[in-house]
Image (spheres, coloured by chain):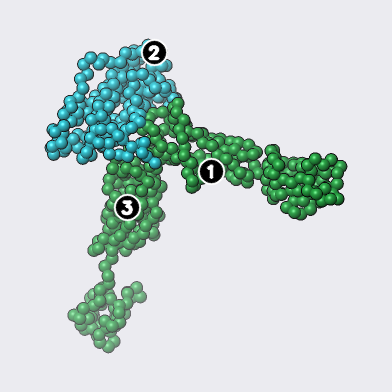
Amino acid sequence: SSADSHIQYERVGADVTMKCGSMDWDAAVTWTANGTDIDDSHLNGSYLILKNVDLTQSGQYSCYEGSSWHLKYQTYLRVGTPPKEPVLMCRSNNYPKGFYCSWHLPSPTYIPNSFNISVIHGMREMVCEKDIFPKNRCHIRYLQLFSTVKYKVTLTVTNALGKNSTTLTFDEFAIVKPDPPESVVAKPVPNNPRRLEVAWQNPSSWPDPESFPLKFFLRYRPLILDQWQHVELSDGTSHTITDAYAGKEYIIQVAAKDNDIGTWSDWSVAVHATPWTEEPKHLTTEAQVTETTSASTSSFMPPPTTKICDKGAVVGSGAMAVCWTAGLVLAAYGVLFI
Amino acid sequence: MAAADTPSATLRRRDLCSRGIRLARKMRSDVTDLLDIYVERQGLDASASVAVVEGVPAAAAERWSEQTGTQRLLDNLAAYRAFRVLLAQMLEEQQEQLGNTDTTLGRALAAVLLQVSAFTYHLEELLQLESHGPPSEEGVGPPARPPLSLFEQKLRGLGVLRELAQWAVRSVWDLRQLAKPNPGSGSAPSLAESQ
């Protein structure tokens, strides 16, 4: 453990002994924790004994001389853990400008940690400029491209109770992964019940798509099905889906990758679209006359699944209001019954 | 440079660049496969670090985005001419080690050597179009083969193939830059200016 005049760090589960400053062991003292008196059962003479400390015992501990209540010692106890091996990730989403590394601890230590990162490329140590936000990230500018020499990134995390580190070694190309495509838009194509037009843009973080063009992977499926259809597109930022199921709502996503190196981006934000469908038409005057003639000689009742049209279209007494398609069926039945 | 700026020359350059890109991509794919075979047959660790080897053209470039089109072509041509010689040396070493080159590794080496030769010729055509003409190879003999142990030869071969794989990617991007309307200027943001 380590302690300074104000803060004392201890591991979870440790036994902690606090002395009341320079007071003798047999001096009469009172200890408080966050202003609350501590029971004498925790005292060994003037020493405060905390066994098997846990996180809830973090706080301010004060020791007062018995009769005068003079403050003789005060410390802030912080209970925590030494750091576990940190998780480190490096990625280039803006090739060929550079790459960034970000990190986190797999579990909290409950006490302050400091991080130090070193980036070695061959014999050269490179500067990793820390981002203001998020603060667990830094970025490196490439000084060379196409190098066969691997990059070695070591992250060390240190706190008052210990330290830990992890190292990543990788090739320049291996960490290239663009951000997902942006502004994905999907819309129906008028008069085409099986088509959807999809368009998107290069991720804004990719600095030079003309020199380092991206290829794309589009996936789509109707909401009612689980299986995706996939299309890989080597150029362009749009595609027309031509095999959509009529009238079904689709979910569509796009991913990006440099044409030659690295890995696919994550999928873009999903967009939804439904192919164009024809508006239901009202009956014409002739059709309505034909239907009335047929209906007068039959007692045909439309099945329950028949859609019901606007009742304003009905002409003549005793006739049912039916849609145009059901009207054709009626006409056919009417012929049978004449 | 006047010949390089005519519309027909521009079209020809773009056509040569497109074909060159396809050649380079195929070459890269085959070199990647060759690397796997090489590592396995030579009993090497695929992740072994290989120090910079004299005579092997390094693909690494510090101010790549600032290069002119002509410089790109000259650098590529010098590299692939060197690789042509190095791969031939590797084939010879195979012959010396095994007594024949009709092995999986030997055939894969020979196939890549053929592609490197074809790509070299392609680069010479591009330089011809730039009215510079390719620099002569006369007087530039093959790099002397330093006396190396068998293990050192194997490591050197690994270094050669790794650099060749990087060059194949670099060549794709070099040719893409060259195919742009103004290939003479370094149009991409420089590394020094990068954020």
Residue A105 percent coordinates (x, y): 56, 43
Mark 2, residue position: B148
Q: Residue at x 31, y 43 (%)?
A: A209
Quadrant showing the N terminus of chain A: top right
The chain holding disc 2 is B
Q: Which mark is residue A104?
A: 1
User: What kind of residue is marked 3?
Assistant: Trp
Tell me which label, 1 or 3, sits earlier in the chain.
1
- Residue at image position (36%, 26%) is B162
Q: According to the rendering, which colour does chain A have?
A: green
Letter of the chain shown cyan in the rendering: B
Are there few (<14), some (14-19), or many (20+) residues within 10 Å of tag 2?
Answer: few
The image quadrant of residue A11 is top right
Picture quarter with the C terminus of chain A: bottom left
Q: Position of residue A178 (x, y in %)?
A: 38, 44
- Distance between mark 2 and mark 3 Cα atoms: 55 Å
Q: Looking at the picture, which amino acid does disc 1 mark?
A: His
Q: Amino acid at mark 2?
A: Leu
Could you say whether the residue bearing mark 3 is in a helix, strand or loop? strand
Check residue A200 in the rendering and tell me which mark sits there, or answer none.
Answer: 3
Percent x, y for residue A75? 72, 45
